[in-house]
Image (cartoon, grey):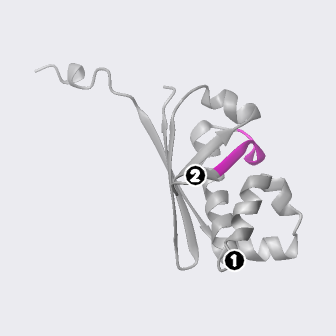
């Protein structure tokens, strides 16, 4: 049996798991409130602040996702990566600038989670290799 032929046509996927401590993000935002505007889009900010009970876990999860996507792409600015929540509850990503160029049409899959003091983002992206 030709083992190489068995995998022919399959897409390579790169995965990145990023975790962020929620209390560190909260301290950063409380100490330097303007950092929110530098790291997050107006839509991200609006969504996180409307989560009245736990806004900082949502900021932390989005920060983790941005870092993971940047690592998976091999570059790009955090401000060029926007993590959105659809009406259905699923999360999606919009890319701008250099991040968009690096992705050039590759599909990005994402899952966000919170547990205790941690927010996590798991990213899977079609590999360019």
- The spot of residue 115 in percent (x, y) is 50, 75
> Depth check: 16 or 45 in front?
45
Badge 2 crowding class, 10 Å Cα cut-off, few under 14, some 14 to 19, many 20 or more, is few
Residue 79, above or below 52:
above
Residue furthest to the left in view is 1
Q: Are marks 2 and 1 in contact (CB under 8 Å)?
A: no
Asked if residue 26 is among those painted magenta in the image, a careful observer would answer: no
In the rendered image, the quadrant that contains the N terminus is: top left
Badge 1 crowding class, 10 Å Cα cut-off, few under 14, some 14 to 19, many 20 or more, is few
- The residue under the point 28% across, 20% down is 8
- The spot of residue 4 in percent (x, y) is 24, 21
First in sequence, mark 2 or 1: give its number.
1
For residue 86, the mark is 2
Q: Circle 2 sits in a helix, a strand or a loop, which is it?
A: loop
- The residue under the point 64% across, 44% down is 70
- The residue under the point 70% across, 66% down is 48
Q: Which residues are magenta?
A: 76-83
In space, the residues marked 2 and 1 are separated at their CA atoms by 18 Å
- The residue under the point 76% across, 33% down is 97
Does residue 50 appear to the left or right of 73 in the view shown?
Answer: right
Q: Circle 1 sits in a helix, a strand or a loop, which is it?
A: loop
Residue 129, above or below 75:
above
- The spot of residue 66 in percent (x, y) is 65, 51
In the picture, residue 21 is in which quadrant? bottom right
For residue 52, the mark is 1
- The spot of residue 121 in percent (x, y) is 54, 57
For residue 127, the mark is none
Does residue 105 appear to the left or right of 27 in the view shown?
Answer: left
Q: Give the total number of marks visible in the rendering.
A: 2
Does residue 124 appear to the left or right of 27 in the view shown?
Answer: left
């Amino acid at each position: 049996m030709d083992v190489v032929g068995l995998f022919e046509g399959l897409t390579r996927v790169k995965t990145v798991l990023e975790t962020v401590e929620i209390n560190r993000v909260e301290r950063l935002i409380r100490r330097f409130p303007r950092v929110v505007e530098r790291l997050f889009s107006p839509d991200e900010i609006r969504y996180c602040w409307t989560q009245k009970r736990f806004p900082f876990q949502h900021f932390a999860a989005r920060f983790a996702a941005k870092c993971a996507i940047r690592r998976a792409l091999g570059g790009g600015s955090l401000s060029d990566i926007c993590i959105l929540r659809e009406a259905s509850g699923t999360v999606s990503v919009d890319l701008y600038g250099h991040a968009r160029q690096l992705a050039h049409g590759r599909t990005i899959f994402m899952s966000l989670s919170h547990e205790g003091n941690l927010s996590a983002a798991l990213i899977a992206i079609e590999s360019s290799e």
